[in-house]
């Protein structure tokens, strides 16, 4: 009996098989058998009872009786291949699904800061230009803007200085994919002319910046960091690029990202940590964080789906603000997960993050997830009056490391692998124990600032079990890459890398995808309820909050929190990319602040107050 996918769905349903995975697995097995025997593939594939049994094991349904299997085979007669018909459409990455994630649930209070009295950014006339412009490499956006506004420096000179540094340190840190030198100099000259004529656009006017190379820029490649996409180009700029152009900012480079936004390895190599170039910069906003931390750009735009702003900011000692989901439109950006992708700034201060967000937030009429939520910075309120919580479990002392008793019998290879795992586990425990002192010190500092801290905990929900949503959406976004076999062009081909993840995600049942989204609704409800009790939450950057708040869409500010001492545990000899917190002596640590949905301005103000009290963001790596 011949059959197709559409027929499978109908007949499986009539047979009482409700797993959405089963038909796809069965059809795939049949197609594979067809290919192996050289059967004419223009004809529907043939199904056997043995294939039904194998598909049932993979799908977690069955076992089936002979009668059920016969009924299924006899009934699969529809010749219309619905899966194949959709595949023939060749849907581009820019087309979103016909649904939109909405983190702000009906009836939930709206944390809209437009009710606060705004205060416009004002230049600081006391900031003076140094004799050597390189001394401004690590200046904040606010400091650079004060100098440009006062015409103490020019955008052209600043752009050339950053261009020189990008060229100088790229050979060491590998953070540039494309320099946009011609475009940048034209923008810088225009900025100088406008400022001289009194047409000042605001604090980003004339400031050089860099874009993560998943943002489309007309006239330049947009590679997504991936082999096979090196020459990809688009005919329009991403919305964020357009808005920064309108703000007068100067685009000097397109920065690296791990291939298709995973990790720090891209088709040209691996982006490095300015504090320790033997390590990667973490990912996937690898180049954006590395370049900002190395003083090679005024600010950068990164993106986060599940840690891609947080991780490289922690590793490189930069300041990042992952905004509320829907605050910044993603039009013109590579889609990985339509319900989790977020674009945000990576800078040298929380105030800089606010200045950038002010220019790029708000709907654009194209990204259906972008909301009309006013962003006004700084909010006029007493930060000491805020209710500040902290995730108590994040700051508790780790439980003692315990060795697992060896089995009664094991091979030499099994013993070797067990010994390796134990050594890695012990080292990770030592690093966590060491880094905890910096997190506890952050709580002590906040108390010294006059802030009363309230212990809170994340709701007990299976956050990790919902990460499959990301994999399923990513596999759909790059469906053609898998089907065409072009996934073999990607740099990384390991178990945890995209090629394998995309293939595996094809076996994720549609029913389970919907169930995970229903569970996600519970997460949004319960995490949002925390912010009815407190306004800000202090958390470890590496804790479970990272998964939880990326699922819920809550904003996070990641700020430097000190430098590890010479007594810090030594990092592993090889940075596998599996552990973002390997650190080592002389490398930075971070702390994360969380806030309610669309309370991003208040979050930035709180983070800025912490930075002014600590000064950790003013410590920079020695590159020479």
Image: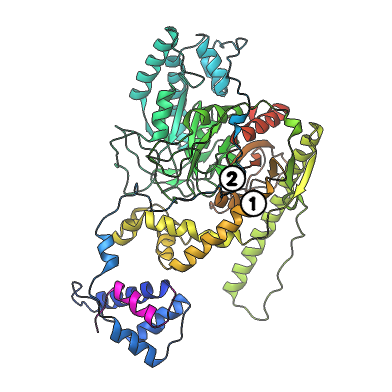
* C-alpha distance separating marks 1 and 2: 9 Å
Report the colour scheme.
rainbow
Total residue callouts: 2
Q: Residues within 10 Å of mark 1 (few under 14, many from 20)?
A: many
Q: Residue furthest front?
A: 107
Residue on which the image places disc 2: 554
**Which corner quadrant of the image does residue 520 belong to?**
bottom right
Q: Position of residue 357 (x, y in %)?
A: 52, 31
Residue shown at 44% from the left, 43% from the top: 257
Residue on which the image places disc 1: 527
Residue shown at 39% from the left, 52% from the top: 491
Q: Is residue 508 visible?
A: no
Q: Residue furthest bottom?
A: 66
Q: Position of residue 63 (x, y in %)?
A: 46, 86
Query: In this view of the protein, which residue sits in the foreground, 399 or 507?
Result: 507
1 and 2 marks in contact (CB < 8 Å): yes
**Which corner quadrant of the image does residue 277 belong to?**
top right
């Amino acid at each position: 009996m011949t059959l197709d996918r559409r027929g499978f769905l109908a007949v499986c349903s009539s047979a009482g098989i409700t797993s959405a995975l089963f038909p796809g697995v069965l059809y795939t097995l049949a197609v594979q058998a067809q290919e192996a025997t050289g059967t004419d593939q223009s004809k529907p594939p043939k199904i056997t009872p043995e294939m039904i049994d194998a598909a049932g094991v993979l799908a977690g349904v069955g076992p089936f009786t002979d009668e059920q299997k016969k009924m299924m085979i006899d009934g699969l007669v529809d010749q219309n291949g619905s899966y194949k018909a959709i595949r023939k459409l060749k849907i581009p990455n820019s087309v979103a699904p016909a649904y939109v994630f909405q983190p702000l649930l009906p009836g939930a209070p709206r944390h809209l800061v437009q009710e606060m009295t705004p205060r416009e950014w004002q230049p600081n006339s006391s900031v003076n230009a140094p004799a050597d412009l390189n001394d401004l490499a690590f200046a904040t956006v606010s400091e650079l803007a004060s100098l440009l506004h006062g015409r103490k420096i020019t955008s052209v000179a600043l752009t050339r200085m950053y261009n020189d540094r990008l060229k100088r340190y790229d050979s060491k840190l590998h953070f540039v994919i494309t320099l946009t030198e011609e475009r940048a100099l034209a923008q810088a000259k225009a900025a100088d002319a406008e400022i001289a004529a009194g047409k000042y656009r605001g604090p980003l006017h004339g400031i050089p910046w860099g874009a993560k190379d998943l943002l489309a820029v007309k006239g330049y490649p947009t590679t997504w960091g991936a082999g096979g996409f090196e020459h990809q180009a688009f005919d329009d700029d991403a919305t964020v690029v357009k808005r920064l152009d309108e703000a007068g900012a100067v685009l000097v480079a397109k920065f690296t990202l791990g291939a298709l936004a995973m990790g720090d390895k891209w088709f040209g190599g691996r982006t490095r940590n300015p504090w320790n170039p033997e390590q990667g910069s973490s990912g996937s906003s690898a180049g954006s964080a590395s370049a900002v931390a190395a003083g090679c750009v005024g600010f950068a735009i990164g993106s986060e789906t599940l840690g891609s702003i947080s991780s490289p900011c922690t590793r490189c000692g930069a300041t990042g603000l992952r905004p509320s989901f829907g605050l910044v439109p993603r039009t013109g950006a590579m889609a990985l997960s339509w319900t989790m992708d977020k674009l945000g700034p990576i800078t040298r201060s929380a105030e800089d993050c606010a200045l950038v967000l002010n220019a790029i937030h708000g709907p654009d009429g194209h990204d259906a997830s972008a909301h009309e939520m006013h962003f006004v910075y700084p909010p006029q309120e007493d930060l000491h009056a805020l209710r500040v919580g902290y995730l108590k479990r994040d700051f508790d002392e780790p439980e003692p490391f315990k060795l697992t008793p060896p089995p009664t019998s094991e091979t030499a290879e099994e013993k070797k692998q067990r010994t390796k795992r134990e050594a890695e586990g012990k080292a990770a425990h030592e690093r966590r124990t060491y880094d905890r002192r910096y997190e506890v010190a952050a709580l002590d500092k906040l108390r010294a600032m006059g802030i009363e801290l309230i212990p809170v905990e994340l709701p007990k929900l299976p956050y990790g079990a919902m990460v499959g949503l990301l994999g399923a959406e990513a596999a759909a976004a790059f469906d053609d890459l898998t089907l065409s076999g072009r996934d073999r062009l990607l740099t990384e081909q390991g178990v945890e890398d995209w090629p394998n993840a995309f293939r595996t995600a094809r076996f994720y049942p549609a029913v389970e995808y919907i169930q995970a989204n229903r569970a996600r609704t519970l997460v949004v409800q319960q995490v949002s309820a925390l912010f009815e009790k407190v306004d800000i939450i202090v958390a470890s950057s590496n804790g479970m909050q990272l998964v939880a708040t990326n699922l819920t869409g809550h904003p996070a500010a990641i700020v430097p929190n000190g430098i590890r001492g010479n007594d810090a545990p030594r990092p592993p000899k090889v940075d596998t990319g599996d552990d973002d917190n390997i650190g080592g002596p002389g490398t930075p640590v971070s702390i994360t602040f969380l806030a309610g949905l669309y309370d991003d301005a208040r979050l930035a103000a709180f983070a800025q107050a912490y930075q002014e009290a600590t000064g950790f963001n003013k410590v920079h790596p020695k590159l020479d």
